Amino acid sequence: MRLRILGCSGGIGVGLRTTSLLLDDDTLIDAGTGLGDLHLDEMAALRNIFITHSHLDHLAGLPLLLDSVFERISTPITLYSQPETIVAIKKHLFNWTIWPDFTCLPSEDSGVLRLVEMSPGETLELGDRRIEMIPVNHSVPAVGYRIESQGRSIAFSGDTTTNDTLWSALNNHASLDVLIVEAAFLNRDLEVSRNAYHYTAEQLGADLRKLHHQPEIYITHAKPGAEDKIFAECQAAVEDRELQLLTHGQLFHL
C-alpha cells in the first residue's frame, strides 16, 4: 500500500494545495486542488474517489479532473461518500450551472462519474485494501477513513474537531501504523475553531489521549502562513507523542 500526499494545506498559495491523497495508483481520498499536480495519464488511471465531506477545499479539483479525462477512460470513476455529501455534490456542483453533470456525460448511459452512497461504519473492500468510513464532528456531515492492507493501516481524520467517534473506531482495531489528523487553527483562535468545527492544537492534544495506539502522527490542514506556529503548539500540547508536519509530495509505503 502506497499513499502519496498531493495536497494537505488549509488553503492555497505558492506551493500550497488543498486536501487530496493518492492511494496506490487508482484511488483518491478527497479531491482538493492537490490532484491538479497529477499527469493526465495518472488522472486517467483513477478508478475510485472517497470524499470526506462537501466543502470546496476537498472537492475543488473534481470537476476539472473529470473534464480532463472523460475522453480518455472507458469505465466510469466511482465516487464514494455518505448520502448527505452525494446530495450536496449533485445539487451544488454537477448541476449544469456550476459545472456539467458528468454522471451523464459523455452520454446518458455512459457517464464518466458514478456516485455510490456509503454509510459511516461501513467497510469497503477494494482488492486487498479495506477502507472503513468513520463518522467525525464537523460543520457539515463528515467522515474520516481507515485503510488497511496486508496487516498495515493508515487513518485520515478528514476535517473534524473534538469527538469520540474517530478515536473509538480506531481503538476497535488491534493496531494503527500512521495517523493523519487535522489541526487547522492556533490556540488563540479557539472561538473561530469552535464555530468552524476544526481542531486547535490544545483540542487535538486532549483528544489524542483517547487513542490507545502509538502510530506515527502527521498534522495536516493548517491555515496558510500559520503552519509552523500551529505545529509548535501541537508539539507543546502532545508531549508524550512524536508528531510530524505533513508535507506536499510526501510518500508513505506500508
Image (spheres, helix red, strand yellow):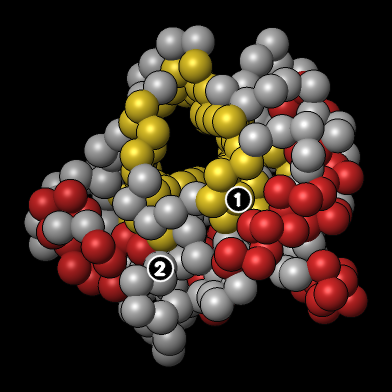
Left or right for 63, reference 18: left
Q: Which mark is residue 73?
A: none
- Residue at 25%, 63% (x, y): give it: 37
The residue beneath circle 1 is: 219
Residue type of the residue flagged with mark 1: Ile
Count of labels in the image: 2
* Residues at circles 2 and 1 in contact by the CB criterion of under 8 Å: no
- Residue at 84%, 75% (x, y): give it: 188
Q: Position of residue 95 (x, y in %)?
A: 46, 79
For numbered disc 2, what is the local secondary structure? loop
Note whether residue 167 is visible: no
- Residue at 34%, 39% (x, y): give it: 251
Residue 129 in which image quadrant: top left
Name the quadrant of the N terminus.
Answer: top left
Q: Position of residue 214 (x, y in %)?
A: 69, 23
Location of residue 201 with respect to 252 vertically, above or below:
below
For numbered disc 1, what is the local secondary structure? strand
Q: Which mark is residue 17?
A: 2
Instruction: Pick the residue in front: 105 or 184.
Output: 184
Instruction: Pick the residue in front: 124 or 252.
Output: 252
Instruction: Give how far apart the Cα atoms at labels 2 and 1 are.
Output: 15 Å
Note whether residue 16 is visible: yes
